[in-house]
Image: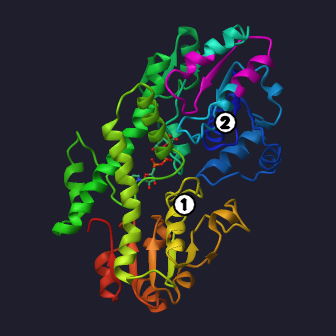
Amino acid sequence: MTNIGIVGGLGHVGLIQSACLAKLGYKVIAYDIDMEKVKTIMKGEMPFQEQGLTELVTEGLNNNTLSFTSEISDLAEAEIVFICVGTPALPNGKSDLSHVYSAVDQIARNRKKNCIAAVKSTVPIGTSRKLTEYLKDNNLSDKVTMVSNPEFLREGTGVKDFWEPDRIVIGAESKEAANKVKQLYSPSEVPVINTTWENSELIKYASNAFLATKISFINEISQLCEDVGADIRVISKGIGLDPRINPHFLQAGIGFSGPCLDKDLNSLINQFKEKQKKPLILESALQVNEQQRASVVEKLQKHLENLRDKDIAVFGMAFKAETDDVRSSHSLPIIRKLLSLGANITVNDPWVKSPEQGRISEAEVAGVEWISSPYRAAKDKDAVLLQTAWQEYENLDYKKLCAEMKKPLVVDGRNLFNREEMESHGIVYVGVGI
Ligand code: UGA
């Protein structure tokens, strides 16, 4: 049985990769530098919410196919080590690769035999080659062979995405190493792209940049819809039925956010600039996204005239439904903007907990009140702003919601509510492109 190591084993990508490979029967050791997190998961408590993950982790722990450690030397026997550490943006727009370099360095220095280091983290094009040079320069090249194996899972459906991938991309110089990584996933029938390091690394960026561009495209069209009396939901359906376009990622709204699309788009733009190229489409996708985010605040201003001392309930903090992740969520800058305009903010989210109970820091949401029921959050408010498309909100009793509010104004940043039904209860409904 192949022994697998995971570095960054308690992050989103790392934990899903660990638990799913353990389910496939491999012996997986997941390493994370955060000892407290390791202790917590050993007690069965997950570091984040993800559908189906708790069961898989518990099963792996019970079967002894999955274990966790905060000692990197415990990965010394692993034949393949997946690197799933973060690559956050630095203030200069470049990706911070210090965790990736440190992972490769430590793996190499803590072993006798060669292993494959398969990079799942999103890294700038050229990183696998540079890491190989780094290993050579440090006389460690007999210890580690670099492979690029980007990840395409989405938060909220990460486990499902692992079992049903669209493709597996493997970038390698060594055919033998590429084959070993491919064999790990061999029960899967999906297309495998065996390619170079650079192609593999760029496929990841181009995928996320294309998805971001698709969202910005539909959001741009939605802006015209509002002026010409068209409905973006019908436009999305109408164009999405063309298989060359397809219906996915055509939901207009508040724009994309979260830990990946924004960061990767910015990093790709930066990589263009480093080569003295101007990425026109990518920069526009980013600008439309910023505009889209600003437009929900403008809609509140238009309907409430002045936001000073207005009471606004914000529904949804997570960057999308089915996750409790607020990292880089659009919700935080929007709330900061509303606060700076003098509004009083109450928030509700089915999964994201207040600073006292959850993982969000007090500083990020200073001055914001948390209320666990959407009806109570809406009580005596001048407006509700919906930021995350949780099903709980879709199923709200509109009559009851309206009765709670001071002024029945709803700005729906996700086109989630039923406009006609809301209006029939006397709610002033403002959507995106409808
Ligand atoms: C994204 C990609 O979809 C994954 O393939 C990739 O692996 C991942 O980034 C990553 O690089 O790790 P994720 O950030 O989890 O996944 O979430 P998405 O489902 O892509 O949604 C991103 C944002 O776009 C959310 O704010 C979502 O609400 C928004 N969105 C999505 C729209 O506004 N409209 C849509 O039609 C779809």
- Label 1 element class: loop
Q: Quadrant of the C terminus?
A: bottom left
Q: Compared with residue 369, is residue 233 higher up or lower down, i.e. above or below? A: above
Q: Is residue 259 left or right of residue 3?
A: left
Does the magenta-highlighted stretch encompass residue 117? yes
Residue span colored magenta: 102-131
Q: Quadrant of the N terminus?
A: top right
Percent across and percent down for residue 186 are 53, 23
Q: Compared with residue 139, is residue 354 higher up or lower down, i.e. above or below? A: below
Which residue sits at x=55%, y=53%? 328
| Residue position for label 2 | 18
- Label 2 element class: helix
Which residue sits at x=57%, y=9%? 176
Q: Amino acid at mark 1?
A: Ala
Q: Of discs 2 and 1, which sits in the foreground?
A: 1
| Residue position for label 1 | 318
In this orientation, which residue lies closer to the viewer: 432 or 156?
432
Percent across and percent down for residue 179 are 54, 14
Q: Amino acid at mark 2?
A: Ser
